[in-house]
Image (cartoon, rainbow, N blue to C red):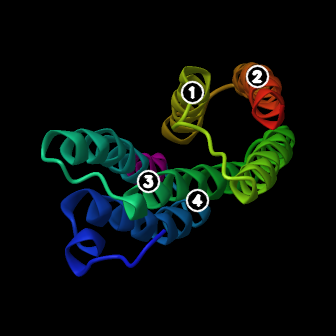
Amino acid sequence: MGKIKKEEIWSIPNCMGYFRILLIPFFCVIYLNADSVKDYYLAAGLVLVSTITDLFDGKVARKFNMVTELGKFVDPFADKLTHGAVALCLCTRYKRMIWLVALMAIKEGFMAVMGLINLRHGKKLDGAKWYGKICTATLFVVLGVLVFMPKISGRIADVLILGEMVIMAIVLVLYAFEFRKMTK
């Protein structure tokens, strides 16, 4: 990545990414200190704002020709931080969430290591694959439901968590095949 211009740093889509990152500590404090359903709804509202902002930053970047290399890093970084923070907070309510957090760490660690290895050889993934986008979308939905519905039954929460783990494991395998093709 070459020198980043000031206008790229402060482009509207990149600012949306920074905003999403700044929402994380507010979500964590509200969620972890929640003592009423209203508090959980407030935390869920922050997740919803983050999700809507995530949907718009890419659209704005493409429509107004504001796609930057920095933005290609900030957007997924904000996604990962948000997912991780929300999932870790949910571990306080749902004991099986730790399994999903562990799988997230394995998947993201694998993606980072393989990305760096391939980058050293002058290769990189050409953007997120469709199955990666599905995984991200379903993860946002599952995490959002668990935050927005604090009184959800443990069984339903377990089904959502395990279902997301299946999706994430399949996506991990598909990316493993993709990286294997790149190394040949």
Residue 70 placement, left or right of 105: left
How many residues crowd mark 2 within 10 Å: few (<14), some (14–19), many (20+)? Answer: some
Residue 71 placement, left or right of 133: left
How many residues crowd mark 4 within 10 Å: few (<14), some (14–19), many (20+)? Answer: some
First-in-chain label (4 vs 1): 4
Which disc number belongs to residue 174? 2
Query: Which element type, helix, strand or loop, lies under badge 4?
Result: helix
Q: Please identify the quarter of the rendering in which residue 96 is found.
A: top right
Reading the image, the residue beneath label 3 is 72
How many residues crowd mark 1 within 10 Å: few (<14), some (14–19), many (20+)? Answer: some
| Mark 1 → mark 3, Cα distance in angstroms | 14 Å
| Mark 2 → mark 1, Cα distance in angstroms | 10 Å
Reading the image, the residue beneath label 1 is 129
First-in-chain label (2 vs 3): 3
Q: What residue type is labelled 4?
A: Leu
- Tell me which segment is drawn in magenta: 37-44
Query: x, y percentage for residue 156?
Result: 70, 20
Q: Which amino acid does label 3 sit on?
A: Lys
How many residues crowd mark 3 within 10 Å: few (<14), some (14–19), many (20+)? Answer: few
- CB atoms of marks 2 and 1 within 8 Å: yes
**In percent of the image, x 77 and y 34: which residue is there?**
179
Reading the image, the residue beneath label 4 is 81
Query: x, y percentage for residue 111?
Result: 74, 46
Q: Which amino acid does label 1 sit on?
A: Lys
**In percent of the image, x 19 and y 45: which residue is there?**
60
Quarter of the image containing the C terminus? top right
Furthest-left residue in this view: 64
First-in-chain label (3 vs 4): 3
